[in-house]
Every structure is written in structure tokens, then in C-alpha cells.
Amino acid sequence: MRVVLPDGSKLTFDHAPTGFEVAERIGKKLAKQALAIKVDGEVRDLQRAVPDDAHVEIVTRGHPDAPELIRHDCAHVLAEATQELYPDTQVTFGPPTETGFYYDFAREEPFTPEDLEKIEQRMHEIIDRDEEIVREVWDRQEAIEYFRSIGEHYKAEHIQTLPDDAVISVYKQGDWLDLCKGPHTPSTAKIGHAFKLMKVSGAYWRGDQRNEQLQRVYGTAWETEKQLKDHLHMLEEAARRDHRKLGRELGLFHQQEEAVGNVFWHPKGWTLYRQIERYLRDKLERDGYVEVKTPQLIDQSLWERSGHWQKFHDNMFTAKSEDDHTLAIKPMNCPGHVQIFKQGITSYRDLPYRMAEFGSCHRYEPSGALHGLMRVRAFTQDDAHIFCTEEQIDDETVKFCALLREVYAAFGFEDVTVKFSDRPETRAGSDEVWDRAEHALKSAVEHAGLPYTLNPGEGAFYGPKLEFVLRDALGRDWQCGTLQVDFVLPERLDATYVGQDGNEHRPVMLHRAILGSFERFIAILIEEHAGKFPLWLAPEQVVVTTITNDADQYAEAVAKRMRAAGLRVKTDLRNEKINYKVREHSNQKVPVIAVVGNTEAAQGTVALRRLGSKQQEVLELDEAVTKLATEARPPASPET
């Protein structure tokens, strides 16, 4: 028996070695540090045997797979601690997550914050016990009967739903055990103490709201105490930047039960929205797009022809007309754009044809999935479709990627990564069509010089796509922009152009968006800047405020001059102390406060205070207006 190490060297054994034996052969210290073994790309317990000629690597702290192992172990320790303290509790599922773990419990009495403190303390004790974690494979019926006998009905029910040939594995730690596929580390001590329980919320058995409601306890777990501390600090900062909180405090928008999943934009929030739209519209016009507007209500028959009805009708809002037609409020703009393209005769000379729409869309999202502006039922897409020939895909992709990165940079996002999503399991179009589409898109993104990672099976139902992911100031990733290559929809909706040979041909349809949805992007933008928008975006750019009422007339004149220069200005002439007014407008994140009093009125000057600075700059009025108006211009294109 032999195994192959990452450097290509081989170890020989006279039997099928366990992962621990492989680690020990490499070195005693490595064996002590080992958490698991990776066999031909699959992470396994150290106690399991390694097959002949397997490629292996030892997983220790610092390995990319270590955090998930630690978090999975933490979930089991959470369940053990909970049942030790509250024996009447049933456990269901407890997987690791991207930053931690959770476990769903069935218990009549709700968990309190004090309960979570007790459970967390017991978890630390279990880790200090250094309980060995051992995997066992059980007979299916034996497992069902065992879990029924100890009152774990959810576990027994789950086993019954597994395929007949499923391996029923159980993990024991101390006197406690749980049904689990694994893998796990050798003992509870391997987890360490860099974890914390965070909250409890409701969940449904198997995620179905028709089933019993459970209690989900969330925790976070890391490899080191520093990582835990950094994560908790990030969460505190994220709470401070929460767009829902800042939206209320800054008077940008609100939401209410009478319009679930919709947004009431307040004057300042709508000013921000329109500024983003204005900037983007200017970019699109400069890049050769034409803007259109398509109907909100479209007959079911068109959605059926496009394939969206079969795929998305559960998420569509519909209405019946008097003539018994079913109309759907559009959840996307694509079929409508094809209808515009089909009017008249399009020549190959007209391609590429770039059609944009700030399309108002509606999708039914479950109430539990709604989250401020991040997840809504009514939203506006910065949507566009490029109708082109297959030979033009490369150039149009390069052009779009340049535009997208320029727009992101203008909003403060420089760290952008790309994912390539290929064919999903359920899709429209033949394998031959998908081969062409995937090849074309890969060629295009490589031609654009953008590195990418593969995102298998996550393409749209009609074609592969690029997903553009932003990283914000807190290190969080947000997927916003997309570019999709579609050979299917033009065929289904009979879109054609006249080629150079005089015959009809199908155009390729590139679906693309930069922001994704205005609502979600604005939420990201609020949190990225913590409400302190750059001057060109700020809903209120300048507040002119007075030290004494004697300067009211001059303050009005200053505001008038600034408005004439295109600045968004308001005045504050209240009979309040200047420090109070400055503090109040600073809390409202106004970028510039122009303070005027008798001295400024007599000298024709203004004292400018910038948000976050205690210093002030005294300038002549003309100079101040020119300076602020220049600063307030939207970011220019690189070539301008």
C-alpha cells in the first residue's frame, strides 16, 4: 500500500493506513497537530483508512479546510452542551456556515440570552474535557430504533428519508452521540476556544413553514482568538453601518407592513437614487446605448414562449383581466427588449445594438427572506441587452467590463473579482448550444484580461454568465454585476437580423447589469460609506448656517449662489447655538457646513467645515463656490 504526498513523494505501508498513521509517518509533531486528512480532494477523519495510491494532504490549523472542521465540531459541542443542560431538548441539524455554525433544536420553552451564556460556558468545559470523537457506521434499522428510543424523533424521521444504500454514520464524543456524515477532528480539544454563541431565531423543520417551528442557535468559530476578535469587531462595525438603521437616521427611506418588500423613498433618499441614475444614464449614453421603456404587465403567453413562466411563475405577481387573460407584472426585462428589437428589419450593419432600461420589476420573495433594501419585492434593474453577432461577443465583453469597472471605481469599489458560472442542471437549449455559449464567454473574459474562478452549475437557465463580486470596506463580498451569453432566447422569441449574405440570422443576446438592482446597490453603498457619501453623491451637499440672525440675509445669498453653481444646498437659520447646529448636521452626514456670521457677511467670505474635521477653511465666496462646485462633479471617464 502506498500514498502520494503533495510534493509527489510516496509513503509505503504493509496495510491500509489510517490518516493518523500517515501523519505520524511524516512526523510526530504533524500527527499531534493534525485535524483531518484530505484524500483525493475529500476531507476525512484521521481514523479512517486511506486507499491505495491515494493523493493525501494533512489538514492542520491554517489549512483552507480547517475552519469548516472546527465549526462543524463546534455545532456538535453546542448540541451536547444544550442536552446536558436541558435534557428535554431534541436536536435536528447543525451544519457549519461561512463564519460559524448553528444547530436547530426542538424545545417547548424558548432559549433566553441567559441560557445561551450557560450553554457557551458548558461548551468551553466540554472542550477542556478533551473528549475523543469517534465515527461508527450503524445498521439503518438499528439507528432508527435507537433514536426513537431516546426521544430523538427528528433524527429517526430523517434516517427513513435517506436512500436505502446510504451509509448511516454516527459520531460519539464522550457519552453523547449524533447522526452525522462528518468529517470531524479527533477530539473536542482540537476546537480551541475561539468561538462565541451569537443569537437564537426561529426555523422550520426541513425549512418548510408547514412543519414544526424549531429554535436555531447561531454561533461563530475561528481558528484563533485574534480572528474571533476581528470578526466580532467587524460585526459591531456592520451593525453601526446597517443601511436600515442609517436609512432611518438620515431620513433616506422607510418600509412598512402595508407595502411589504417595497420602499418609501424620502426626499433625501430619492435624491441619492436619482443622482446614481443620472450618473449611470450619462455613462450609458456615452457608451452607445439607447434607452427604452417596456410595459409592467405582459400576457402570460409571452412569458411561456420565453421560458420564464416555467422557471419563475411561482415568483411572479399575476392579475386576471376581464377577457380572462393572465397578466404578469414583469420580474425581468428580457422578453420586452426582444419585442422592441423585432420591430422593423434589423441589418448586420445595426449590430451591436445596445438597449438599456431602468426597468421596474417585481418578484414575490418569501417574507422571511426580505431584508431592508437588500432583498425586496419591487426593485429597479439597471438592465441592458446587447444584440450582436457571435463574432462581436469578445469586443462587447471587453467594452462592458471596462465600463463596469469604471462605474464601480466611481462609487468607491476597487476590489472586484469575477466568477464564471456554467450550465445548470435545469436549462433551456441543447448541449451543443451551451458548448458554443460557454466557449464564447470564456474566450471573451480571457480577452478582457480578467482572472476568474469557476462557479459550477450556477449559470442562468438560458446561458452561462460572469458574476462580478465587490468587496466592501468590511471585507464582505457582494455579487452585483452580471454578463450572460444567450443563444436561446432569440431562438425562442424568433429574433432575427439580415446578414451580409442577405439571409436571416439569429443574434446573440448579451444580458448585462452593472448595479444589479438600484435598491440593493444603494444598501451596499450606504454601508460602504457608513452614510458619509462623497460630495458628488451626498443628498445634501452643503448646509449654510448662521452664527447670529443678523447674518440671515447673507446666508440666503450664499445659498442662492451655490445653488446657481449646481450644488444641493439648504439653509439653517434657526436661533440655536452654532455648535449645536454643526453637531446636528454632522450627525446627518452633511459633507460641508458653511458657517456665516457678521464678520463673513462684512467680508464676503464663508467658513467651510468638512465632515469629520474640526478645522475650518475661510474663503471668499466666489472661491468657495468654485471650489465646491468642482469637487461636486461626478467622477469623469478616464479619457476625459
Image (tube, rainbow, N blue to C red):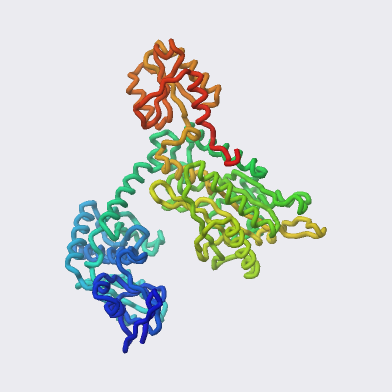
Q: Image check: 383 left or right of 534? A: right
Q: Image check: 396 left or right of 586? A: right
Q: Residue at x 57, y 59 (%)?
A: 465
Does residue 525 appear in the picture of this structure?
A: yes
Quadrant including the C terminus = top right
Where residue 435 sits, quadrant-wise, is bottom right
**Depth order, front residue of 64/143:** 64
**Depth order, front residue of 133/403:** 403
x and y percentages locating residue 26 in the rendered image: 29, 77
Q: Residue at x 23, y 62 (%)?
A: 192
Q: Residue at x 62, y 45 (%)?
A: 357
**Depth order, front residue of 14/295:** 14
x and y percentages locating residue 234 in the rendered image: 33, 48
**Depth order, front residue of 395/387:** 395
Does residue 324 appear in the picture of this structure?
A: no
Count of picture labels: 0
Farthest bottom residue? 14
Q: With respect to residue 577, does 470 lie above or below?
A: below
Where residue 278 sits, quadrant-wise, is top right
Q: With respect to residue 459, does 185 lie above or below?
A: below
Quadrant including the N terminus = bottom left
x and y percentages locating residue 90 in the rendered image: 27, 66
Q: With respect to residue 132, does 3 lie above or below?
A: below
x and y percentages locating residue 16 in the rendered image: 33, 85
Q: Residue at x 76, y 51 (%)?
A: 349
